[in-house]
C-alpha cells in the first residue's frame, strides 16, 4: 500500500513540476463507451469510442474509435493489440490546432491487476505508434491543410484504484475509482517536452449486472503541445457506459 501511494502521488504531481509558456483553460464534457466481448475463455474483442466537447457543448474537442484484440495470459495479466483513429478539432483560445487534425495509432498494451483485501489495483502500460497529421499552408497561402503525417512514439501508463462501496449478494454494485494516467513522449521525434498529457481521475460507478455499468468521473486533463509553447489545464466530466458480453462456448 505504501508503494502504491508513492506511485499515485508522484503521478499526480508530475504536472506541477512541468512548465510551458502559455496556459489555457477549457471545461470539457466527455461521453465514452467501452465494450468487451469474450470470444473464448481467454480471447476477447474490445471496442471503445468517445465524443468530447469543451466549454459545455459549444465546441467539439475530439472523437476517436479504438478496436482491440485482447488475450488473458494469466488471471492477473492481459495483453492487447489495437488500432485507434482520432479526429481533434480546433478549440480553445489559443488553439492547439490550426485545422481539424487526424491521427492514427497502432498500439500494444499490457494490463496487470492485483488485489489487497477489497482494494483492486490496475496497472496499464500502452505503447502507441502514432501517425499524426501535420498542418501546412496550402499552395494559395491563405489557409492550412494536412500536408503529411509524422511518426511519433508515446507511452501511456495508467494506475487505477477501485474500491467497492455497496455489495448485493456479494456482488459489487457501487464503487469508487481514483487514479492517474501519464502520457510520455519517447523516441527521436518526441517533441520539446517529455510529457504529452496527464490525467488525474476520481469518480464512481454503478454496476447494473454483469453486462452493464455506468461511471461518472472527474478528470483534470493537462496537455502540452509538440513545441512546448502551450499547456492546457482542463477540468473534465466524463460519463462512461461499459459493457461486457460473453460469447464463448464454455460450460458453466
Image (cartoon, helix red, strand yellow):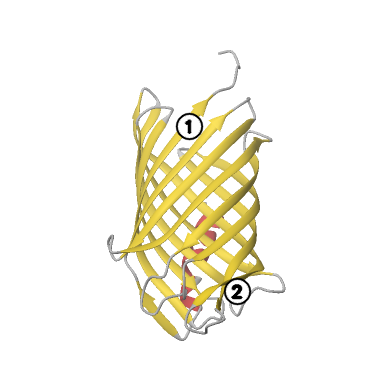
- Residue at 41% x, 70% y is 90
- Determine which of the numbered discs, if any, sits on residue 178 in the image: none
Q: Quadrant of residue 218?
A: bottom left
Q: Locate the C terminus by quadrant.
A: top right
Query: Percent x, y for residue 240?
Result: 38, 45
Q: Are marks 2 and 1 in contact (CB under 8 Å)?
A: no
Query: Percent x, y for residue 10?
Result: 52, 66
Q: Quadrant of residue 149?
A: bottom right
In this view of the protein, can residue 119 be seen by the observer? yes
Residue farthest to the right? 188
Q: In the rendered view, does 120 fall on the left or right side of 207?
A: right
- Residue at 47% x, 83% y is 142
Query: Percent x, y for residue 174?
Result: 34, 37
Q: In the rendered view, does 103 fall on the left or right side of 153?
A: left
Residue farthest to the front? 140
In this view of the protein, can residue 8 be seen by the observer? no
- Residue at 49% x, 42% y is 120
Q: Quadrant of residue 33?
A: top left
Tell me: residue 185, above or below residue 94: above
Q: Secondary structure at mark 2?
A: loop
Look at mark 2 in the image and give the residue it sits on.
Answer: 194
Look at mark 1 in the image and give the residue it sits on.
Answer: 244
User: In front: 159, or 63?
Assistant: 63
User: In front: 154, or 161?
Assistant: 154
Query: Percent x, y for residue 95?
Result: 41, 76
Amino acid at each position: 500500500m505504501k508503494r502504491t501511494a508513492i506511485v499515485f502521488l508522484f503521478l499526480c504531481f508530475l504536472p506541477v513540476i512541468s512548465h510551458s509558456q502559455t496556459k489555457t483553460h477549457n471545461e470539457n464534457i466527455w461521453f465514452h463507451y467501452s465494450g468487451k466481448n469474450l470470444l473464448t475463455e481467454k480471447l476477447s474483442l474490445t471496442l471503445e469510442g468517445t465524443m468530447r466537447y469543451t466549454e459545455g457543448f459549444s465546441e467539439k474537442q475530439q472523437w476517436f474509435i479504438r478496436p482491440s484484440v485482447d488475450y488473458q495470459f494469466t488471471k492477473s495479466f492481459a495483453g492487447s493489440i489495437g488500432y485507434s483513429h482520432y479526429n481533434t478539432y480546433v478549440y480553445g483560445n489559443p488553439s492547439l490546432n490550426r485545422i481539424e487534425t487526424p491521427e492514427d495509432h497502432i498500439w500494444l498494451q499490457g494490463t496487470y491487476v492485483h488485489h489487497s483485501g477489497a482494494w483492486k489495483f490496475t496497472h496499464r502500460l500502452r505503447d502507441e505508434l502514432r501517425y499524426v497529421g501535420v498542418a501546412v499552408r496550402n499552395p494559395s497561402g491563405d489557409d492550412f491543410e494536412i500536408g503529411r503525417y509524422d511518426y511519433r512514439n508515446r507511452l501511456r501508463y495508467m494506475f487505477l484504484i477501485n474500491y467497492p462501496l455497496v455489495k448485493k449478494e456479494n456482488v459489487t454494485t457501487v464503487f469508487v475509482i481514483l487514479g492517474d494516467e501519464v502520457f510520455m513522449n519517447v523516441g527521436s521525434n518526441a517533441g520539446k517536452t517529455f510529457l504529452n498529457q496527464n490525467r488525474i481521475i476520481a469518480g464512481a460507478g454503478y454496476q447494473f449486472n454483469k453486462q452493464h455499468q455506468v461511471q461518472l468521473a472527474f478528470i483534470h486533463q493537462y496537455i502540452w503541445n509538440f513545441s512546448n509553447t502551450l499547456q492546457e489545464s482542463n477540468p473534465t466530466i466524463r460519463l462512461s457506459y461499459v459493457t461486457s458480453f460473453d460469447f464463448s462456448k464454455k460450460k458453466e
